[in-house]
Image (cartoon, helix red, strand yellow):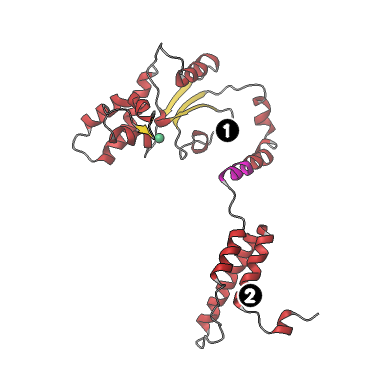
Amino acid sequence: MASRADTEGPVKYDEAQLKLLSLLVSKPELKDAAATKLAAVAEELEKTVSSDTGMTDVEAPVPVPRSVHHELLQKVPEEPSPIKKLKNGFVGFKSHYFEKESDLFEPLKTGQSPKVFIIACCDSRVSPDTIMSASPGEVFTLRNIANLVPPMEEAGKLHSTSAALEYAVLHLKVEHIIVKGHRACGGINALMTSEPDAEPATINGARSYIGDWMAIAAPARAKTLEECKGKDLDTQLRYCEKESVNNSQRNHI
Ligand SMILES: [Zn+2]
């Protein structure tokens, strides 16, 4: 059978590009392989150009018409959505970890007995299990804005932190409690850059809860302003991130 080049002459750059894009629309799983081959072609062409002073053999690429290019790119499936990526991660966890580490997971089917309770910030960058390389069942964890422990209160019923402390200490009988602060905490930034006596903030007319929550760390703010008087905001933030942990530790004693 005669090839296309035999019958119609050399392949044009724009036609080859269109053909590749069309292929990736129907077979997106080939994107990685295509990327590898394109990188190799680019490297080879670069060598050809640098070793050939004539350079006339290298035909200038003819771009695919913008409208066609745009339409095709729209059809190429994008990267997995955040939810899809997490689902894939869970499937990978099950097949590569859960199903192969029966010594670890078998006892966890009937209960947990962590030795450590960690109170950490909601911040997506500082997941305790991840950054401390903890295994499932190793740490009991509570996360809230700025890793705060409120003072014990008799009134009210919405005691998330107190309930977690009660369960960790009385039922799980943990041996250690860690309040884990972190650098560049948005909650601490909000605390240090807002007026504590200001009216409660609102979002589209509804009350914002962050100010009330961060008021738990007001003593840390006051001490920071006292100890870091005249210093820049960054210094104050670093100090308050640590002092807020001290404040939370005092609150849970
Ligand atoms: Zn934080």
Q: Quadrant for the N terminus, please.
A: bottom right
Where residue 253 sits, quadrant-wise, is top left
Q: What secondary structure predominates along the stretch shown in magenta?
A: helix
Where residue 196 sits, quadrant-wise, is top left
Residue that carries the numbered disc 1 in the rendered image: 135
Q: Residue 212: x, y in percent?
A: 35, 25
Q: Secondary structure at mark 2?
A: helix
Label disc, if present, on residue 191 of the rendered structure: none
| Furthest residue toward front | 205
Q: Amino acid at mark 1?
A: Ser
As for residue 126 lying within the magenta part, the answer is: no
Label disc, if present, on residue 15 of the rendered structure: 2
Q: Callout 2 environment at 10 Å: few (<14), some (14 to 19), or many (20+)?
A: few
Disc 2 vs disc 1: which is toward the camera?
Answer: 2
The residue segment tinted magenta is 82-89
Where residue 82 sits, quadrant-wise, is top right
Q: Secondary structure at mark 1?
A: loop
As for residue 87 lying within the magenta part, the answer is: yes
Front residue of 83 and 203: 203
Give the left or right position of residue 76, taking residue 121 as reference: right
Q: Which residue is located at x 63 percent, y 66 percent?
A: 21
| Furthest residue toward left | 230
Q: Which residue is located at x 58 percent, y 52 percent?
A: 79
Q: Is residue 38 above or below residue 246?
A: below
Q: Residue 62: x, y in percent?
A: 55, 77
Mark sitting earlier along the chain (2/1): 2
Q: Is residue 221 above or below residue 16?
A: above
Q: Amino acid at mark 2?
A: Glu
